[in-house]
């Protein structure tokens, strides 16, 4: 039986809330999903500033986190109502809403005496009350409870949507952080997934610093610059790039503070900085995924970085043995990919079925992800 559901995603780029309205049926690898509509509600400047403040150990506070949890819940609920209204659908008729939440901090290996843990905000009770339907949220913790890193969590959805019997597919998402999923040909489910390193995060921060814009549109700034090989070599020496998969990272390694320190250490022109950072993203991806190419291999790129033409050219040059495609080449949406993934995870949880991939996260068994908030 086919149902309607909404997947919500708010990623490390802090662009806003992505909402995907889907038609979904079936379970496990027989799940069928069709995108009906997609929209993004940008964060208002005040909200974005509050989120950025909450990410800083120095600036955040208990009161801010408590308030932001509810405020984000309101924004997520609004996104559901808006996409339903746009499609003449009553939100109460949705089978469920699946919300990832806004990641504030993620430390899968612990930090300075603190235990492994993660924090995503966006109160599910608020979303349920506003939308009058079941909400499934907080997907990462269940995997961490069984020894996993709680990331990446999208590989299960990628198995459902992209696995091919004859071709090895490497799905590379380039959001704030870059993450890859290796889908072997032949129907194997023992997939591997990991964060490759920075995606757009450093590039975006440099664009804000030099040009007061949010991102490098189509790579136009990078196109005018030159790669500084000395700086690039230093960037590639980052400890995270040298780690073996499975591994996961975030703003803790490559965020605003990291970029600020780079700007103090090296003196480059604006466009040289942006091109060098773009090459850092491309090279960290290429060197990490190259060993997984087996036989005929397709690299499928999604996320905001797929619209950066300079970055795509760099990847094609660094990985000549792979066929490089975008989500759009396969008939999917780069922007909607992760929100759709949330809907697929939510569907598994709704039917009390597991959706983590232990070979990707390091968990010692499969578990049902997320927490369920019922509307009554």
Image (cartoon, grey):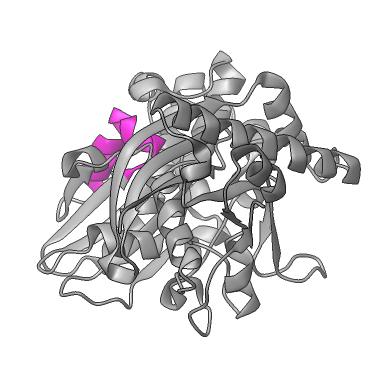
* Figure check: 372 above or below 116: above
120 or 89, which lies in front?
89
Residue 79 image offset from top left, x and y in percent: 54, 32
Which one is nearer the viewer's eye here, 368 or 167? 368
User: Is 146 positioned to the left or the right of 257 in the image?
Assistant: left
Name, please, the residue furthest toward the top: 211
Q: Would you identify the image quadrant in which residue 49 lies? A: top right
Residue 93 in view in this figure? yes
Q: Nearer the viewer, residue 262 or 266?
A: 262
Question: In the figure, 243 relative to 277: above or below?
Answer: below
The answer to which image quadrant residue 12 occupies is top right
Q: Is residue 166 left or right of residue 219?
A: left
Give the residue drawn at x 72%, y 68%: 110
Magenta range is 302-318
Query: Does residue 304 show up magenta in the picture?
Result: yes
Q: Quick one: which residue is furthest to the bottom in this view?
A: 364
Residue 76 in magenta stretch: no
Viewer-nearest residue: 259 or 8: 8
Looking at the picture, does residue 175 appear above or below residue 220?
below
Q: Main secondary structure of the magenta part?
A: helix
């Amino acid at each position: 039986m086919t149902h309607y559901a909404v997947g919500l995603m708010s990623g490390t780029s802090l662009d806003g809330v992505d909402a995907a309205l889907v038609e979904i049926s079936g379970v496990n690898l027989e799940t069928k999903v069709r995108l009906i509509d997609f929209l993004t509600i940008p964060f208002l400047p005040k909200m974005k500033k509050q989120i950025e403040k909450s990410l800083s150990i120095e600036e955040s506070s208990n009161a801010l986190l408590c308030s932001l949890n509810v405020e984000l819940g309101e924004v997520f609920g609004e996104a559901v109502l808006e996409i339903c209204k746009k499609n003449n659908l009553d939100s109460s008729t949705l089978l469920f809403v699946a919300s990832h939440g806004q990641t504030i901090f993620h430390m899968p290996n612990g930090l300075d005496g603190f235990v492994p843990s993660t924090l995503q905000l966006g109160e599910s009770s608020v979303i349920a009350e506003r939308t009058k339907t079941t909400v499934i949220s907080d997907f990462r913790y269940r995997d961490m409870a069984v020894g996993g890193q709680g990331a990446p969590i999208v590989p299960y959805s990628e198995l459902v949507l992209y696995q091919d019997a004859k071709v090895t597919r490497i799905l590379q998402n380039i959001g704030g952080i870059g993450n890859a999923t290796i889908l072997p040909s032949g129907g194997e489910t023992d997939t591997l997934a990991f964060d490759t390193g920075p995606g757009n995060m450093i590039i975006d921060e440099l664009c804000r610093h030099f040009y007061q814009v949010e991102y490098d549109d189509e790579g136009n700034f990078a196109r005018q610059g030159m790669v500084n090989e000395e700086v690039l070599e230093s960037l590639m020496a980052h400890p995270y790039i040298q780690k073996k998969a499975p591994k996961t990272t975030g703003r803790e390694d490559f965020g605003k503070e990291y970029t600020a320190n780079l700007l103090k250490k090296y003196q480059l022109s604006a466009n040289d900085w942006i091109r060098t950072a773009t090459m850092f993203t491309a090279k960290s991806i290429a060197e990490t995924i190259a060993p997984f190419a087996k036989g005929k291999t397709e690299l499928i790129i999604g996320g905001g970085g797929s619209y950066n033409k300079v970055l795509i050219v760099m990847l094609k040059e660094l990985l000549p043995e792979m066929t490089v495609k975008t989500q759009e080449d396969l008939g999917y949406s780069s922007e909607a990919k992760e929100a759709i993934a949330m809907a697929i995870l939510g569907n598994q949880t709704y039917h009390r079925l597991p959706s983590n991939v232990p070979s990707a996260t390091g968990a010692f068994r499969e578990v049902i992800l997320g927490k369920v908030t019922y509307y009554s």
